[in-house]
Amino acid sequence: MTALPPDGTIVQGDALEVLRGWPSGSVQCCITSPPYWGLRDYGLDPWIGGDLACDHKPSTTPGKRGIATSTIDGGKHTTGHQQEGYKIDCPRCSAVRAGQQIGLEATPDEHVTRLVEVFREVRRVLRDDGVLFLNYGDAYAGSGNGGNPEGSKWAGFVGNQARESQAKGNGALQTNLKPKDLIGLPWMVAFALRADGWWLRSDIVWAKGVSFCPTWAGSVMPESVRDRPTRSHEYLFLLAKGQWKRRAVKLADLGSEPLHLGRSLSGSDPDTWAARISICLASAILDSPQVKQKLSSVALQTEIGQQNTGCISGLPIRDLPTIERVATYATRLLNADTSPKEFLTEIHSLGLVMGQGDAFLVAGGNLEITHAPLIHAYGERSIAIHDASKIGEFNFQHGEIIAHSATICKYFYDSEAVREEMSQATIDRRGWEGSAGWDHGEKRTNPPADVKNINWLKTALHQGRNLRSVWVINPQPYPGAHFATFPEALVEPCIRAGTSERGACPACGAPWVRVVEASGGLLAQEGRTIPSGTLVGGFSKAGMDRRSETEYARHTTGWRAGCDCTSTPQPHSPHGEGGEQPQPQPPAPRPCIVLDPFAGSGTTGMVAARLWRAFVGIDLAGGDKDLGGHTAHDRIRGAREGRTTEEAAGARKHGQTDLLDLTRAPSARSLSVGRGTIEKLEG
């Protein structure tokens, strides 16, 4: 398990593979927009076989329907087109793509499955109080009568978010979708993540354009459709990791009863998880091509000391070659002749490590296990089975079964950081209306004579309101060579709400918590006369009677540590005999860490740097790929240093790449308030 990369780094590689090497519970927030299904091919995967001179493209004519020139190679199209080229296999030369790119799967279901695998690792890397903001757009199933020519497997595959003209759906139709159906991809992903253990907390509509609004229309990609509205929104889901109870049991402490295949395996205790993992692992072993080939002509017996136990007769199981030995234990387990404890202990003694992709290697690679049903990697040192609110983990480094079960959903969310002001029209409308105006839509220019001092209501409205779930944000153009960058304005509220502005504990990563004081507005009041049934600002007489003449106000007074960690007090010279010893204080906070496993052009990192958060990202192209005179790292570095991207790129070219010191924190003085410490900001 490796440490996180330095702040501002975008690691080049496959998101799933890179995340597996990062420590658990190490980041506070994840904000990302994964590649949409069937939308684009970024041209980052190698081809195997075929003609080396073939460009694997159906046409060399730019502008042909369904084909566009890649902006990565200097083209101008960034939205609404597929990148030129075949997707999985090339019918011209029979080459096959050896791809890692998410979004090029044959069906939506395969695409969702791959995303679930990535976000399992994201959840592991997140702290228990961490959150995920996931942006995703939808697509339509096509008619199957056009698209890429020459019989490609991806003939007419789905294009952009409104790509009916290009969606000719071998992928779509495989999932029982009718032509012109809205696929519902965002909700497929959201529900799959919820079933995998995430808490789905909110769906946020990113409105890029609206109708029936006289003051704002927005900016959306035009669509040549006449039988439905033009799509002008995407989704942003808020998901939480939540708290999980963890119970670890060493293999030696498991029960020794043989496996009974007829018994229920629906429990969540370590013995049940051991049985389920053993069955899946044993089935995968016996289904391995190496085992099938080795034992195809040999009757494998399962009793120690009997003849024909493999290539060598009459030997104990432990003296057999590796493949025969593992296969024997797998057969004994499935025949209910041995216990999961004995089987997993044997696998552990041989050594189980992660291979490429979803493969597991036994005994230093002598046996490779692929496509184990239900089992997936869980970090670098474990395999696991996910079952919604339960996880069963086999840690093959320490030789233990770990049962995880979801308990409660508590997470960091700073609602004060994204509180928004009410409009003046709302303040005027709600502040001065009496019952008649409220009922009949008439506006009073003065407060009712029988209502005294209504200023507190105007003040309360000026304090703002909680963030709504529809965000009206225009798409933001990006001149660099990358597709579909989401706007900075969409990322900023996610970072503000999902991470602490003050930072996090450097020891445990717990974010510091905002301390908010509210005064006025809720105190009991005497002597106030309001006619029965009167509504003032939407409050009933009963509600008004509980309020005071004091104006309601909310103020951030400081910050407090979110944990009990303390730094070592520095000794000092006492003043006389009664000198006081220094009190333990929480360690100085460090910036919270924001993760984007599909970093692309680095927009998330750039906004994080501007808001003084740390950032780590992953991308197949990495952060140093030229995007048109600059790189993603240049954008992040420029935001951190207060420079433009062009200035940061120029500094990089001259070897000036020093970042500012992230360990600095805003000027603060400590104010001891009971248990713990509150950091009160100056000014």
Image (cartoon, grey):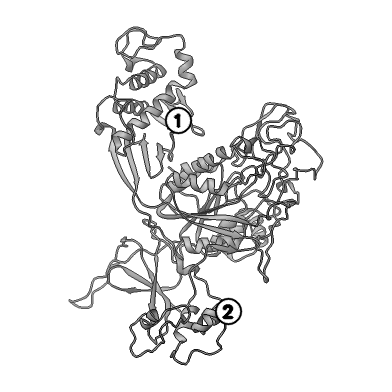
Residue that sits furthest to the right in the current view: 61
First reached walking from the N terminus: tag 2 or tag 1: 1
Where residue 373 is drawn, which disc sits there? 1
The C terminus sits in image quarter:
bottom left
Identified by mark 1, the residue type is Pro
Q: Is residue 657 visible?
A: no
How many numbered marks have been drawn onto this rendered protein structure? 2
Q: Dot 1, how many residues are within 10 Å of its Cα: few (below 14), some (14-19), or many (20+)?
A: few
**Residue 185 rendering spot, x and y as whole percentages:** 57, 46
Q: Nearer the viewer, residue 558 or 670?
A: 558
Q: Secondary structure at mark 2?
A: helix
Q: Residue at coordinates 21% horizontally, 75% vertically from top-left?
A: 579
Q: Is residue 233 left or right of residue 239?
A: right
Q: Is residue 601 visible?
A: yes
Residue, disc 2: 425
Q: Residue at coordinates 38% horizontally, 12% vertically from top-left?
A: 300
Seen in the picture, residue 427 relative to 98 is either above or below; the reply is below
Q: Nearer the viewer, residue 497 or 25?
A: 497
Q: Secondary structure at mark 1?
A: loop
